[in-house]
Amino acid sequence: MQRLPLTGLAVLFSLLTLLSPAHATNDNFLPGDSFFPSKVLYENLQRQEQEAEPVYYYNYICELAFCGYAGYSQLKLDKQNEQLAANIRKAYLHIRKSQPIRLRPKKNAKLPQKNQGNPNLDNFYETNGLSIFFYNEDYDWQRLKIGLKYNENWREEMKKFINAGRYCAFVKKGDALKRSTTMAKQVPPLNVKIPEADIETGKKVDLPLTPTAPSKP
């Protein structure tokens, strides 16, 4: 686990692993969640180099359900956070020194020989992408742990999108679920601006969230 200490927003990296799956509504970020999970792939970093305000997509890890979608699917680092985006790229490249990228060919693509240089990533899947968790800078992850949403109002927030559904828990163990519920009032939600959008029943919002303050290294 690697942490970037930033004012206003903190980023935690780890090798991408699927946590315990849970049947649930296909919920993305709901206001009140303590973090926004995403996934970092090299091809995304290359694309973001051409973007003034890079966007990160919600990394949904639960089994897909058929009862619709809820929540907000994107988080954007605006210009006041361009240094944070640069630091994320540096952290990814640093981790890759000890954990090299692994690729799986699409269709009939073949991995290049060592002397052929880097492959065209359009023809491959990166199989060991990195999990990235956006938290408030003062979040005490050693005490509060990673992957617990601490959202006491998730039912009310979900009902804005769909009448029925179960929350997607990243960590499904009983003690973790109990901690997330009993300590929810003590853990502030992620400090992001919620975009103005007309919510449609059973559909997620694809307009991005944005941090409410600049983040500095």
Image (cartoon, rainbow, N blue to C red):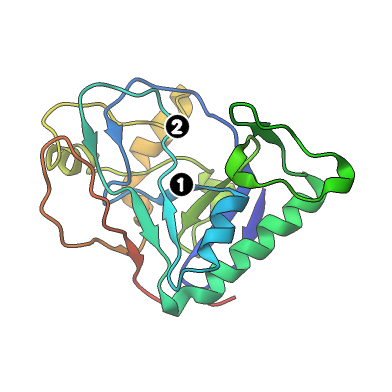
Amino acid at the residue labelled 2: Ile
State the image coordinates of residue 108 (x, y, percent, origin top left): 64, 27
| Residue 175 visible, this orientation | yes
Counting residues from the N terminus, which is met first, the one under dot 2 or under dot 1? 1
State the image coordinates of residue 146 (x, y, percent, origin top left): 53, 43
Q: Which mark is residue 61?
A: 2
User: How many numbered marks have been drawn onto this rendered protein structure?
Assistant: 2
Mark 2 secondary-structure assignment: loop
At label 2, counting other C-alpha atoms closer than 10 Å, the crowd grade (few under 14, some 14-19, many 20 or more) is some
Q: Residue at x 22, y 44 (%)?
A: 153
Q: Nearer the viewer, residue 96 or 47?
A: 47
| Residue 214 visible, this orientation | no
Q: Are marks 2 and 1 in contact (CB under 8 Å)?
A: yes
Q: Is residue 11 left or right of residue 8?
A: right
Amino acid at the residue labelled 1: Pro
Farthest-out residue, right: 115
Task: Measure how far apart labels 2 and 1 are at the Cα level.
Answer: 10 Å
Q: Is residue 112 left or right of residue 125?
A: right
Q: Is residue 112 left or right of residue 2?
A: right
| Quarter residue 86 falls in | bottom right
Note whether 83 is above or below 9 in the view shown.
below
Note whether 68 is above or below 145 in the view shown.
above
Note whether 26 is above or below 100 in the view shown.
above
Q: Residue at x 43, y 70 (%)?
A: 53
Q: In the rendered image, which residue does mark 1 sit on?
A: 37
State the image coordinates of residue 10 (x, y, percent, origin top left): 53, 62
State the image coordinates of residue 121 (x, y, percent, origin top left): 63, 46
Q: Which mark is residue 20?
A: none
Mark 1 secondary-structure assignment: strand
Quadrant showing the C terminus = bottom right
